[in-house]
Amino acid sequence: MTTDITPFTLHIPDADLHDLTRRLANTRLLSDIPDPAAVDVGIPIPAGWEYGVPVAYLRPLLDKWREFDWRAVEQRLNAVPQFVTEIDGQTVHFAHVRSPEPDAVPLLMLHGWPSSFVEFLDLIPELTDPRAADLDPSCAFHLVIASYPGFPLSGPTTESGWNPQRMAAAMTTLMERLGYDRYGVHGNDAGAIIAPEIGRRAPENVIGIHVDQIFSFPVGAPGEFDDLGPDDYAALEFGQNYLQRAIHDSSQRAQPHTLSHALSDSPAGQLAWLAQLLAHNVSDEALLTNATLYWHTNTSASSARFYFESAHAPTPTTPTTVPIGLAAFGDDFTPPRKFADRDHTNLVHWREYTAGGHWAAYQVPALLAQDIRDFFAKVV
């Protein structure tokens, strides 16, 4: 294994782009129900999506993908300094953007599934150079935006076992290799699972952890429902309804490879699988950018395995101790505070917003960036 850090430039070969266009042109769409019956599924969903991603949505998006100017997107992505290194036998891709402020705080940013490092690109200017945005320059960050092993652009994993704890170990090694012995972490979705594990693994190195979700649920302990109020029960019901409808969670947790055979062969299927979570929450360009990255890196199966590995990983037996901050946005799961305090002994920041949602970095980047700044101003 080498510890070298190598500059990375994204370039998808022309032949691969032509193959994608050919496959898109030959897509066979399913037979759709023109007017599906409205069903109350317990969580907010657009009308017509009761059965999942409808043909009426997917067809025009596939047309956009056929005309998508990938080279222009590639040029914008390559404007961000990117690198690769090898950790635990696996290529790890990351963007590394240093702040012009000499006292900036190193911040590791961890994206969700089915997203990629693209998730945080809109936050870079404000977080790295607040002075240019007429913001307080005393809270600036050197950003490390990582791509997990098995995800674009780190590529498929070559062995099993990449659970949150192993991901956390790789991310800790990455920050150490970059020379950062004290740093913060921000995580969303899968990143909000991995980030606390980094705090458990390296509490002496982690200044604080900022997340968009805290995944604290009932565990069957005596009296755990005592003193819960109506809002707490509503939050639990929201989470239960979401999990019942979350086909990606149940299928990838149980059999990540079964569906991935189809996703690796059909770009239309890959796009629909991403759209079930990202549609109506991100721009078409962001969705197509992520779909292109997943397709050309063939990481549908290896990224899906994260759900399987998480379900079979050791359950933490002790709470975290590093400072943690939560920014809960829009129609997203927020646990009862009682459960969050049970799992995290140093929860110092808790804000709930009506704007945004599960994909706040895409939806309300300025609001998320400000919350990150506010949290780390408390703990640095």
Image (spheres, grey):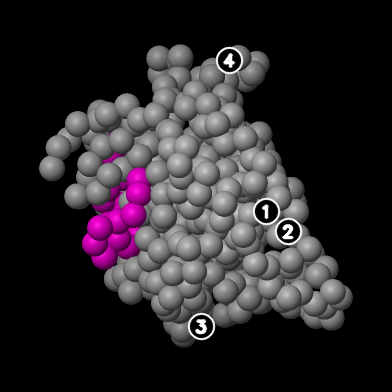
Q: In terms of sequence position, does the residue under pointer 4 or pointer 2 come before the other?
A: 2
Which residue lies at the image location 49% right of the left edge and 23% below the top edge? 79
Q: Quadrant of the C terminus?
A: top left
Q: Nearer the viewer, residue 209 or 380?
A: 209
Residue 321 relative to residue 278: left or right:
left
- Specify whether residue 142 is in view: no
Q: CA distance from mark 3 to mark 4?
A: 50 Å
The residue that disc 1 covers is 62
Read off the magenta span: 154-175
Q: Is residue 187 above or below residue 367?
A: below
Query: Among all residues in the image, which is located at the extreme left?
Result: 1
Please identify the quarter of the rendering in which residue 69 is found.
Answer: top right
The residue that disc 2 covers is 59
Q: In terms of sequence position, does the residue under pointer 4 or pointer 1 come before the other?
A: 1
Reply yes or no: does residue 363 show up in magenta.
Answer: no
Which residue lies at the image location 73% right of the left edge and 75% below the top edge? 31
